[in-house]
Image (spheres, coloured by chain):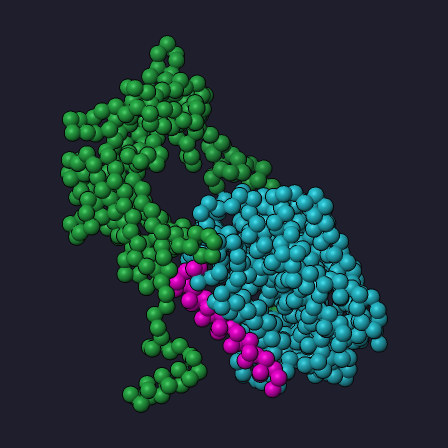
Amino acid sequence: MNTIASPSAEQITKALLPQKFGRAGTIWTSILVVLCLAGLVGYYRQLQNGLVVTGMRDYASWGIYISNFVFFVAISLVGSLITAIFRLTNVEWRTPLTRISEIIAVSAILFAGMIIIVDMGRPERFTNLFFHGRFQSPIIWDVIVITTYLTLSILFLYFPLLPDLPILIKNSKAGSGTQKFYKFLGSFWKGTTEQFRLSEKAIRIISVMIIPVALAIHTVTSWLFATTYRPGWDSTNFGAYFVSGAFLVGAGGVVVAMYVFRRAYKLETYITEKHFDNMGKILVMLALLYFYFNINEYLVPAFKMKKAEEHHLMGLFTGDFAIMFWFAILIGMVIPVITLIFPQGRKPNVLFVMGIFVVVGAWFKRFLIVTPTLLSPFLPIYDAPESYSRYFPTWEEWAIAMGSLAGSLLIITVFARYFPIIPIHETIVEKTFKS
Amino acid sequence: MKRYNYLAVCIAALCNIPLPGYAQPSEKSSVRLALTYNQLNYNLPILKASAKTKKGKKFEPVEGVEISFFFANETSRGFAGRIKTTSKGEASMVLPARFKHQFDSLSTCLFKATLTSNDQFEDASAEVEITKGKIELALIELDSTRTISAKVLIRNDTGWAAVPGVDVKLVVRRLLSDLSAGEELYTTGETGEASASYALTIPGDINGLVTFGAKIEDHDLLGNLTTTKTANWGIPLKPDNTFAKRTLFATRDKTPLWLLSFPNLLIAGVWGTIFYLLYQLIKIRKIGKTSSTT
């Protein structure tokens, strides 16, 4: 505890303490709030009139809500990558990135759960999943594993936050609501050896446990698709394909977030070019891995070109979804790999753009996994109107989907407003130890 | 206001812009209307109308137009109902029960379908006149030889008379379509009868019941007639009892034991650890409170 009193510790504390929103922060938050409200209006209309307000019909019964769900689950995996895997493998430069990745994980998994409820025609029957759910259904597995991962992610965010809470209490306005909130969360943390021992032990346990749970969450999500017999989904490769894609989008999300926080809070001393360089290398590796799985997923079926799957595959390669498909492959994998293999490509500005490319590409990739398959059934529905064989989201769907993405970003933004986005105590210990 | 209207007409005339209030009515398309008479098992007949319009070189169905149906004459007394066409341009209705007495008493019936007062299409009509007929279906089993026999009768002034030379389909009725019981078509003989020996072995219901049918299609005089009858000539269906066992497709109380035990062990292990972590948190809290009091 003596280290906190040292001058360098004070400088670190001052630099890393949460700051009030500036003009840009206020505008950013306002935009997110407006998007969330638009999403609520869309959802109100959906509740009032039913799922008929969406573009989903008998064929495309899963649209951008489920694409969004898969995207959220994917990006949430970053919590286990940066925090757990890096912690267990003693990656030294991980400290400034751990909290960023954990809050991304928590906010993403929260909205993954919510968007599933939005996709339900009768959301008030959600509890039936728990009371009447069948263990044979992958949907139940998904509900269980999402709840577990959310709980673990919150604990993984909370335990390392404990040593920072006394610092926040000390540096907040006495008697203010914020200070009361900090006290509620961690006034009991006195920094005793025993408290540190218990906390470290808990973090180690979570680090080990969250990896299989994180793999399970995305594998189970992939099984929602792979356990059904449909073109494009009938694959034994799906679990690994989803997990590799999730690591890629998660790393891309962290790159974008670390760039934004670095710029907004002037954290150049803590999030250095070395961090960007390392994250760039990781992105290349993950993009190549995901590219490998994509080749497996598309090239092998394309080589066989089974008649029943032809409509789906040709729709992706040269048909209605071709532009989106090649766009997602190019900006989600090919361009980032080509750019990031060069050291100049791993500089913060370029890497930030590549991070955005990866995230945007990943969102479209999720849509391409979900919807085109549904529009290419093995057995067409008898007497279905022609319009059912196409899908385009309505404004309500766009509003809800964008609102959920904004909601997730809003959680991260509000968190960064009240909590240090880089662990203060851990940074102080690390810097002191190094010096 | 008048001045504005005058001005608008002038500008529109100069610029050749059609104004909603002053536009010439656009030309109406012609419609081809067809009407058929369909009767199943001596019930009241079903009238089916279809509307098509020519677009380019093709005829396309006309959706959403109202077709009026009439029985005997096109008056309010003969008005049977008004139905909107489907996306296939079809409208059908069962002759209302109020016409039953009249329908039963007649040997020749006239039906009419009309399309009138439509903004897009010209008036059109179609009629069909039929002489009432019926098919008597018999399913005969003699010395393990099964025969389907149909007799076609037509109504005249004296009663019912046999009709020779009519094409009849003898079928087994299945869920989505009819299956020929023997040949594709049979023609009635002098006695108005046509028969087929039945040798198929196909599944029936739980008691082996199979529905057979005799059909006359698009006959100039009789229209479309169908008569059906059931007999236990099928193989009795053995119900699939898989749902009563522990399978992946069963109800939740019949979850396979391996699926119940293995994931639940995992869940117990993970959530047990989570509760242990929460317990650690409580311990940390207690230590903090104790140290602050001391």
User: Relative to residue A49, is residue A135 drawn left or right?
Assistant: right
Image: magenta residue range? A23-52
Q: x%, y% of residue A125?
A: 42, 54
User: Relative to residue A348, is residue A108 drawn left or right?
Assistant: left
Observer-nearest residue: B133 or A175? Answer: B133
Quadrant in the rendering for residue B197: top left
The quadrant of the rendering that contains the N terminus of chain A is bottom right
Does B85 lie within the magenta span? no
Question: How many labels were placed on the picture?
Answer: 0
Q: x%, y% of residue B216?
A: 34, 31
Extreme top residue here?
B143
Quadrant in the rendering for residue B169: top left
Q: Is residue B273 visible?
A: no
Q: x%, y% of residue A37?
A: 48, 74
Observer-nearest residue: A210 or B63? Answer: B63
Instruction: Specify the chain shown as cyan.
Output: A
Q: Is residue A234 above or below residue B185?
A: below
Q: Is residue B138 above or below residue A389?
A: above
Q: x%, y% of residue B274?
A: 60, 55
Instruction: Specify the chain shown as green.
Output: B
The residue at the point 36 percent across, 63 percent down is B28
The residue at the point 42 percent across, 67 percent down is A44
The quadrant of the rendering that contains the C terminus of chain A is bottom right
Query: Which SS type dominates the magenta stretch?
Result: helix
